[in-house]
Amino acid sequence: MRWGGSSGLGAPMAEFSYRAYRDNGAATEGRISARDPASARRALRAQGLHPSLIDAAGSAAAPGNAVALAPVKLAHLAFWAARMTALVTGGVELDRALEITVPETPKTAMDRAARRMQSAVRDGAGPAEAARLAGLPASAVGVLRAAEATGDIGAAFGAIEASTAAALARRRAIINALTYPILLVFIAIGAFAFMLLVIIPRFEPIFARALSEIPLTTQRVLALSGWVRAEAPLILTFLAAASVLLLLVLRSPLAGRLRAAAVRVLPGGAGISAALIQGRILNQLAGFLAAGVTLPDALALVRNAMDDPRFADRLAKVAEAVQTGTLLSDALRDHAVLEGELLSLVRAGEESGALVAMLRLAAQSADSRADTAIKRLLVVLEPVLILLIGVIIGGMILSIFQAVLSINDVVI
């Protein structure tokens, strides 16, 4: 399969080290003389090799660094991957397929990523390297890297589309469940602001004549109302700046890690986060093994696609243990990657010889566990928010009535 290429003339020859895959999936590495990385890739392609890593320094590391683009939206990635699947499996070459799909994702992070990937492929980069340079998610890069071993790039795009669609469906379910609680929060904020800025100031002239007679809680509510009105410009400026900062953070490459950290802070969130990560590990591992990647290499690919440093370190230790002859299930248990039912399913797969099928079954179990935990959390969250809003608003109203009754008692 041809990825693409362009010429680079006039530059002096240099030596590059590389790692590549043959058409039969066998891995190889070595050195090659060329004018630049693109020329080296073209020369390797002419030899029937599919380069994945090339470096002029002698360690087969990928050239260049992925640009820190805004995160690609899941909906855009799923749509793009579905179109790429249809085109590549239909026989369209990768560079031409990228050229066709770019106009279909106008002015989005996916558009920029697709254009960068198209440019890298035309310079001779393999699919995985081009995806990495384009800033696509690490999980997508890992799937493409495994597919380079078999040459079935169309199936890789299909796997990316399926996993992205599943993640998108889960996110939409969470957003739908959170819509009502979020609406309650905004209503509470509006009611709180209305009380402080409109209602309470109307009572201030009445309370001012008998300030020492009204309850302490009412005095504090009056002081808060006065401070909010006096500092309104500063408060609005702060809120606007905070909103802009939040928007920039959510559009940055750190958004995924921040969301994961936020989930872990919630009650039961650590379990939800772990189940989601375990499901992804099992799914990717099953996909790589099904594509013919050896177990140590599959573990390395999963580790490289992992954005959680804790699990990345654990998977590195698992890969080392497997290379020394330890069973996968024992290594996953010893390094706290899996436990309980998930671990039993992996062990059953090793014993029966159906490891890929059992890995996928374990992944479904982990995803189901995460979905159940998320639903339970949301069921508890809604009444807690309602109770909290009721206490805040009710407390303010009660303080006003207490003050009115206190003044009446003084007058009488």
Image (cartoon, rainbow, N blue to C red):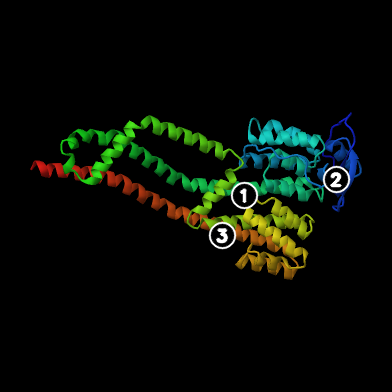
Mark 2, Cα crowd under 10 Å, few <14 / some 14-19 / many 20+, is many
Q: Position of residue 373 (x, y in %)?
A: 52, 58
Dots 2 and 1: beta carbons under 8 Å? no
Mark yes or no: residue 195 visible. Answer: no
Please state if 335 lies on the left or on the right of 14 as rendered: left
Viewer-closest of 65 and 333: 65
Q: Earlier in the sequence, mark 2 or mark 3?
A: 2
Q: Earlier in the sequence, mark 3 or mark 1?
A: 1
> Residue beneath label 3, please?
369
Give the residue type that dot 3 points to.
Arg
> Residue beneath label 2, please?
17
Q: CA distance from mark 2 to mark 1?
A: 38 Å
Q: CA distance from mark 2 to mark 3?
A: 45 Å
Please state if 17 lies on the left or on the right of 143 as rendered: right
Q: Earlier in the sequence, mark 2 or mark 1?
A: 2
Q: Quadrant of residue 370?
A: bottom right
Give the residue type that dot 2 points to.
Ser
- Quarter of the image that includes the C terminus: top left
Residue at 40% in and 43% down: 185
